[in-house]
Amino acid sequence: MIKHGGFVYYQEGCCLVRCKDEEADNDNYEVLFNLEELKLDQPFIDCIRVAPDEKYVAAKIRTEDSEASTCVVVKLCDQPVMEASFPNVSSFEWVKDEEDEDVLFYTFQRNLRCHDVYRATFGDNKRNERFYTEKDPSYFIFLYLTKDSRFLTMNIMNKTTSEVWLIDGLSPWDPPVLIQKRIRGVLYYVEHRDDELYILTNVGEPTEFKLMRTAADTPAIMNWDLFFTMKRNTKVIDMDMFKDHCVLFLKHSNLLYVNVIGLADDSVRSLKLPPWACGFIMDSNYDPKNCPFQLCSPIRPPKYYTYKFAENKLFEETGHEDPITKTSRVLRIEAKSKDGKLVPMTVFHKTDSEDLQKKPLLVHVYGAYGMDLKMNFRPERRVLVDDGWILAYCHVRGGGELGLQWHADGRLTKKLNGLADLEACIKTLHGQGFSQPSLTALTAFSAGGVLVGALCNSNPELLRAVTLEAPFLDVLNTMMDTTLPLTLEELEEWGNPSSDEKHKSYIKRYCPYQNIKPQHYPSIHITAYENDERVPLKGIMNYTKKLQEAITKHTEDTGEGYQAPNIILDIHPGGNHVIEDSHKKITAQFKFLYEELGLDNTNVFEDLKKFLKF
């Protein structure tokens, strides 16, 4: 849903619709486009952008089983009509030129790579032309329109370096202006206000994000002035710009904060948010007087909050209070890794749980790309806590929970730090009375599979069961295959084993596939997707086959009485990478966990149906 002018644009059933803002809660809407015209299987709208004067609306449309998308452009008139459609669009934004003509800029994605930017006009002066092509295959491009719509920014990035060009929102046919040529290891993002650029960047010491500013007509790095610095161990989640304020959404020492910076007097107000909150959900907002956002946790649905600048206060949504706030506890504890580094964890369990050592434990981990472990609301996690489970989220190095250095300390030739952190977290949980190995399961998706697979090789006795979704398990062979779409883009994370012997030998030390051996393993349930381009099915199948062979060998060597673990590979059709809301997948994972841990599932599947709205 997006608000523009006096209208709200959103999806209703299989249609793109709009209604007047004041009628948003009614059924009095205007149908703009029927998604069924695209002849896709269960299409949904992923993103909406409205042209400045509301002559056109563009919507990116996807399906659950594919990452491919189509951007449709609809002309807004008495009888709305689809003006154009573009395949494989990633990001897109509107600007208006000197002659009041709407210009759509969009990026074209091919083989998961975004290297081309196009601009298009419609109506009587229809055209579509390529505007920019990035030559370095390790970089990708996304477009962002500054909050005041003054500039369209073309962000050219890889995992550790960025370069931003400004496209004048008043003269979009002029050549773009480079802010600062890419410098290896320097990241920066740009906002604009009153002829000044506000730049969120890691340039300088310490190499964590800080806020700088410069005049828009002198954008180069030598003109950047330090404006605001973050505390140590702080992750910048997002930034929002207003007429007189800049709002920073932060995670510091595993707790959420909002910093409101007064741009007229450089004042700073730091607001510590409720301890139950684990994640932000940012709303599209064009209200200059208020800053709305949502807070959520894995077991609690999102709740609305609004910071009102005039009153200098944060207001909480009133109404029904979710009972989970009284029936569950959230704890923030730390584990000491083998090098002495303290690793934060977030733990959930029922308030009235007795003898936690006898309760089942589900541990979550990711630890890659500087990305935070997902802490958004998942109804199935709520069901587990209600049924007596303990949930633990381990924020290991390689992720981004404590800032950029936390990521740097868990990538390339420091990837084993993440494995040591995960091991320390699980041992700390057991040591503090949270469950025991026979009742412990570990779960991860995508790149999180690297640490999980590595732990299954090195310390399988810590676990009873594992669930993996679209897991990355064969790091060495994948990173040596430059024909795969993401290999070049991900050299900054895993290293280049094809040309660097040090990287190759280091990857061999932790790569799950390379280190499978005849020994005891926990039972493992793997969900994979048939046409997944990010984690090819072939690598998962090779891992599964090698693991089963090692288990068979260990079973034969051990002799009678040994109970071999179950290894299940559940292959789903489609080409998406991870499908969060698949009822079939969630039910299969629950069935596996309850059977492997020997738990009573009398009520859990009925509760699951209720929460998933079967």
Image: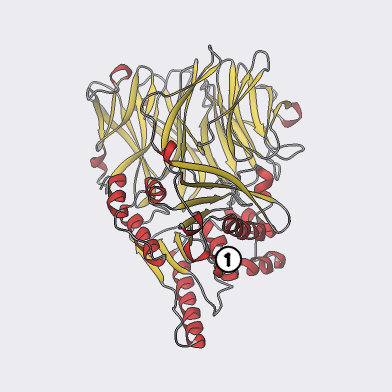
Q: Nearer the viewer, residue 323 or 517?
A: 323
Q: Amino acid at mark 1?
A: Ala
Q: Nearer the viewer, residue 345 or 167?
A: 345
Above or below 263: residue 104: below
Give the SS element for disc 1. helix
Determine which quarter of the picture holds residue 613: top left
Horizontal arrangement in the rendering, residue 155 relative to residue 595 (left or right): right
Q: Residue at x 65, y 69 (%)?
A: 509
Which residue is labeled 1 in the image? 454
* Residue 322: % across, % down: 39, 34
Horizontal arrangement in the rendering, residue 257 relative to residue 563 (left or right): right
Q: Residue at x 54, y 15 (%)?
A: 309
Q: Is residue 529 visible?
A: no
Above or below 257: residue 586: below
Horizontal arrangement in the rendering, residue 49 relative to residue 557 (left or right): left
Q: Nearer the viewer, residue 573 or 360?
A: 360
Q: Nearer the viewer, residue 267 or 166?
A: 267
* Mark 1 surroundings within 10 Å by alpha-carbon count, few (fewer than 14), some (14 through 19), many (20 or more): many
Q: Is residue 526 visible?
A: yes
Quarter placement of the N terminus? top left
* Residue 258: % across, % down: 58, 28
Q: Residue furthest top?
A: 310
* Residue 178: % across, % down: 64, 32
Above or below 516: residue 240: above
Horizontal arrangement in the rendering, residue 439 relative to residue 212 (left or right): left
* Residue 320: % across, % down: 36, 28
Protein image colouring: secondary structure
How many numbered discs?
Answer: 1
